Amino acid sequence: MGQKDPRVDAYIEKAAPFARPILSRIRSVVHTGCPGVEETIKWGMPAFDFNGPLCGMAAFKAHATLGFWKASLLRTGKTPLGKPSEKAMGQFGRITSLEDLPPQRTLVALVRKAAALNERGVKAVRTPKPKAPLPAPRDLMAALRKNRAALQTFEGFSPGHKREYVEWILEAKREETRARRIETAVQWMSQGRGRNWKYA
């Protein structure tokens, strides 16, 4: 049997007047689509769990949002639910009135599909965002240019291996520590070693 959380009642009551009917509708739809759902608060916002995270909703000053945890695996008809909206968190953009919500039947169907995925233990594939290249600091590059073998090793590294050295040097809090790390890095790279060679 589903479980309601009084903190969700309090959240809805404190929301802006435009958001209250939206949040109440979403809550009702989730309980209709998944009678065994349990309410909670995560990251300060109402969330719904059923054998794991199902979906969540939130209200802001001028809009509300709704997001499904496994949205990448859900479809409305033949259309994938897909990525979060660029305009707001969740997959439905900025919801400012009940008219901005998909039809109730569509939402109930999405909740049922999401609950079925959780019940079967299906995991959503999360693709990590690639990290932007981290430029090597000047003092490291100056030291590497004085040692051809170390420079060749550094230039041959993958972006991830370069980042390991660069982050290690940038994390030094004192100049002496930084200088010592650069000296060690050049020595290791002159021997063709990555930053974490000791653990390889």
Image: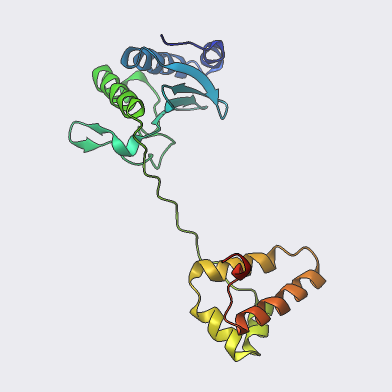
Q: In x, y percent, where is residue 40?
A: 52, 19
Picture coordinates of residue 4, whole percent (x, y): 48, 10
Q: Is residue 29 above or below residue 150?
A: above
In the image, 124 versus 96, the foreground residue is 124
What residue is shown at x 37% (from left), y 37% (from top)?
123
Taking the image as shown, residue 110 lies to the left or right of residue 96, namely: left
Q: How is the image coloured?
A: rainbow
Q: Position of residue 33 (x, y in %)?
A: 31, 16
Where residue 106 sits, quadrant-wise, is top left
Q: In terms of image quadrants, where is residue 193?
A: bottom right
**Residue shown at 68% from the left, 69% from the top:** 169
Q: Is residue 91 above or below residue 133?
A: above
Up the image or down, 47 lies above or below 170; here it is above
Residue at the location (41% across, 8% down)?
A: 1
Quadrant of the drawing holding the C terminus: bottom right
Residue 186: x percent and y percent? 66, 81
Q: How many marks?
A: 0
Residue 103 horizontal side relative to residue 65, left or right: left
